Amino acid sequence: MEKYSSMDDNELISLLRQGEEQIVEYLMEKYKPIVKKRARTMFLAGGDHEDLLQEGMMGLFKAILEFDPEKGASFPTFASLCISRQMLSAIEASQRKKHQPLNSSISFGELEISGGEAVTSSDQNPESIVLDQERADDLMMEISSVLSPYENRVLKAYLQGLDYIQISEVLGKTPKSVDNALQRIRTKVQAIRK
């Protein structure tokens, strides 16, 4: 694999098209940090961080197979776009109503038999769900009250699963401005939680 480190991505893709299939593995490892970075900025309802990483790696794999240097984009740009789209598609799919039974299902391992009736062993009864939602709403109101209008818009976009670049495009600001706002938000939220 070391022989590939001195080659640029276009050369690697060209060799891949000629049948050197181990290049796929090399490029997957080379660009895995981009997938990890992108996954840290997103949330998948009903899933975990590993699910997002898998989605991102599928996006990277598709990018490797579909990249066309003749179209003018660099491979890192194309790969980043494919990774983001794959993750966002997974997030959107997880939020659709048709997946609600899967996202809120209970495994048989979580069930206990009590007095002839099946009950969940978790504390997710309707009352605790409502109380948790009320606490979350109260916390969001408290956070919102200490943030500037711009920071509130950034936080809302961030919680919707947008990354720094997407937020900057939506709000008409630079990615650095978005990054600075998120740093201020983290500091303010930590102060509230103390």
Image (spheres, rainbow, N blue to C red):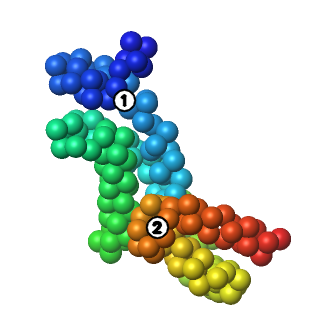
- Identified by mark 2, the residue type is Ser
Q: Which mark is residue 168?
A: 2
Query: What's the residue at 30%, 45% (across, down)?
Result: 78
Q: Position of residue 44 (x, y in %)?
A: 45, 61
Residue 57 is at least partly visible in this image? yes
Q: Which mark is residue 27?
A: 1
Q: Position of residue 171 (x, y in %)?
A: 45, 75
Residue 117 is at least partly visible in this image? no
Query: What's the residue at 32%, 56% (across, down)?
Result: 85
The quarter of the picture where the C terminus appears is bottom right
Where is residue 177, by image quadrant?
bottom right
Image vertical order of residue 5 relative to residue 116, above or below: above
The quarter of the picture where the N terminus appears is top left
- Identified by mark 1, the residue type is Leu
Q: Out of 75 and 125, give the one closest to the viewer.
A: 75
Query: What's the residue at 50%, 65% (across, down)?
Result: 174
70 vs 83, left or right, is left
